[in-house]
Image: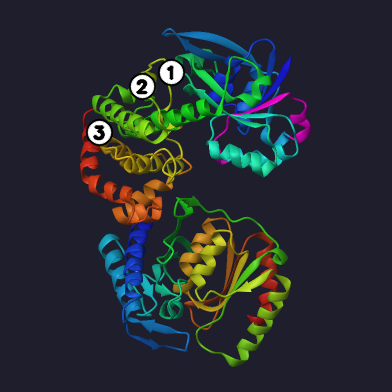
Amino acid sequence: MIKVLVFGAGAIGRGYVPWLFDSNHTIDFVDANSKLISELKNQKYYVSFMIKDGAYVKKVVEVSNIYHIDEVTSQVVDDYDFVITAVGPRQFMGLSELFKQSAIPVVCFENDRNLVSLMRSSTSRANIFFGIPDVISSNSTSKELQEEFKNSLITEDGQTFVESGAVQLGGDIAYVDEAEIAKQWAAKLYIHNTPHCIAAYLGSLIGAEFLHEAMQHRLIDEIVTGVATEMAEMTRKEYGLTNKFSMFYLNKEIARFKNVLLCDPIKRIAREPFRKLALSDRLIGAASKAIVNNVNIENTLTGIIAAFSYDDPSDPDKNIKILFNSLGREDFLNIAIGLGKHEVVYQLLLKNWDSSLKLIEEVKHNV
Amino acid sequence: MSNLKHAINAAVAAGNVVLALRDTNFSRHNKESNRDVVTEADLISERLIIDSLTQNLLSFSYLSEELNILVGDQSNYWAIDPIDGTANFVAGSSNFCVSLGHVSGAALNTGVVFAPASNDLYYASIEEGAYKNQKKLSVNSCVLRESLITFSLPGKPDLEGDKCKYKLLSELNQLSSGIIRLGSAALHLVHHADGVYGGCVGFDAPIWDIAGGLAICNIAGSSYRLFPTDNEYRFHYVCAPGDLLDHLCVLMEPCL
């Protein structure tokens, strides 16, 4: 029996990870959401739905132990055979002190690859592995399903790639070499992440709650497919992905975004726009790589400008709205985004600003 | 958000002009002392801010450094420093900023400080919270021995009073991790809000120097106390979180 402790009881951690393992594994959870912890402790189980062949398959997951992050010491961690992290990048490095004091192997999902390297060096440990769950999971379900199955989630039937050093974890995981990880990561980072969040920013402009609702809008579909095409071209030129693989990945992603069974909340995908707009991340970073490779990125630039105007008062980065409404375009790029005026992406954003705003207005008015 | 929006807009526009003027042959003259300087850039910045806020705010009362007269409602006005740290500006240092703070009765409810040379924009309102560029600001508690403390002296010399202040400066230098004097009270305060300095002490500071910075510190979770002087718009002040505020107040007491 392999005992697994999962940090992050969200879409990936609680929705998808249990599907990876069979009865030879037990799973416990750690989270920071006291309300969720208390509800799951009372419920003693929850339901994760997997989409297979256009229908839901139900999995009842027993909750034996779920800890609040503040309760977890190295002694708790040492009681397990493997740790999986499925937390956001802002929370991930907060675990380094804990991992320094434990030798239990860690597989990190849903994080920047560089952060995993940083975690290895900051903990002086080699048995921290990078993994890519190639799947979209939603931390919620439809209202009807929530009424029947409180705290239920939905996940796709995807594939997971993990560095081969973690093979002892077992389960339904492909343990692969460095070249395969690099290929999958480039595709996930740009052919998935970039159009995925742009679809959410455009969807928020028309008040869509779920991603598939946004993708039902003709113009949004066109822009998002355009972004995915631009990113596929960039990854071919920058990372040497084959035409066949990049187009397979693109088509798979667009079909995922449109999946009406997934109920992927716009708010979750669009969360923390400043993080996504960081100079090396999926928006500005992706655009910069495309520019260097001479890729025309008209759609991506429109998506970035849609991200600038994101408005969610409950978001940790809600101040993006204050800055967007207060500053002129050049000052916004400079002060809010950190782009210098000599950078090509800065100049292209300014050049495309008006046409992008016009397109965004069309999106809003053609609901 | 409307007040904050217009204050950000005015501060950044003025700051950009000030930065552009730094490399020109601007005129200057001294006011109350060698380090109390006014330049052409101060006057242009002040005009830009007043014009911008007059145009954009429904009701706009203000007290600005160079005009030095309160225009409008005494209980509800903007305190404007068109360049805080003018001596630094003249010397070519980057430690200067534009500072705006909204005074409403005894409360400071909005603050904007823009340091154009570093492109650092600090902004806060009670409704929206306190930020530096993208980042949310939150001040944590700290103790004196582990803190850098900023120390601001008045522009006008006061031979008797200064002895006490220099004694306090020496004492704080021993008790803390060190004393910082950047030559801009507003920058002292916003760096405190950003977690760089543990606390701020200052004497005989005009409200336009400190209103923006204190508002940002307070909204970021720090606390402040103002002590009156013989001028209703000048204050001795201390700003620090929790117990450190009380500790600094006790040390300052002989100079008040």
The amino acid sitting under disc 3 is Lys
Which numbered disc covers residue A364? 3
Q: Are marks 1 and 2 in contact (CB under 8 Å)?
A: yes
Query: What chain is tagged by disc 2?
Result: A
The amino acid sitting under disc 1 is Leu
Which of discs 3 and 1 lies nearer the camera? The answer is: 1
Q: Quadrant of residue A72?
A: top right
Give above or below for B190 relative to A5.
Answer: below
Helix, strand or loop under label 1: loop
Q: Quadrant of residue A38?
A: top right
The amino acid sitting under disc 2 is His
- Of the 4 image quadrants, the one containing the N terminus of chain A is top right
The crowd level at tag 1 (other Cα within 10 Å; few <14, some 14-19, many 20+) is: many
Q: Tell whether position A77 is magenta.
A: yes
Magenta-tinted stretch = A73-90
Residue B51 x %, y %:
27, 68
Judge left or right: residue A359 versus residue B127: left
Q: On the image, numbered disc 1 is attached to which residue? A: A262
Which of discs 2 and 3 lies nearer the camera? The answer is: 2
Discs 1 and 2 lie in a common subunit: yes
The crowd level at tag 2 (other Cα within 10 Å; few <14, some 14-19, many 20+) is: many
- Ranked by sequence position, the earlier of labels 3 and 1 is 1
Front-most of B243 and B93? B93
Judge left or right: residue B163 versus residue A328: right
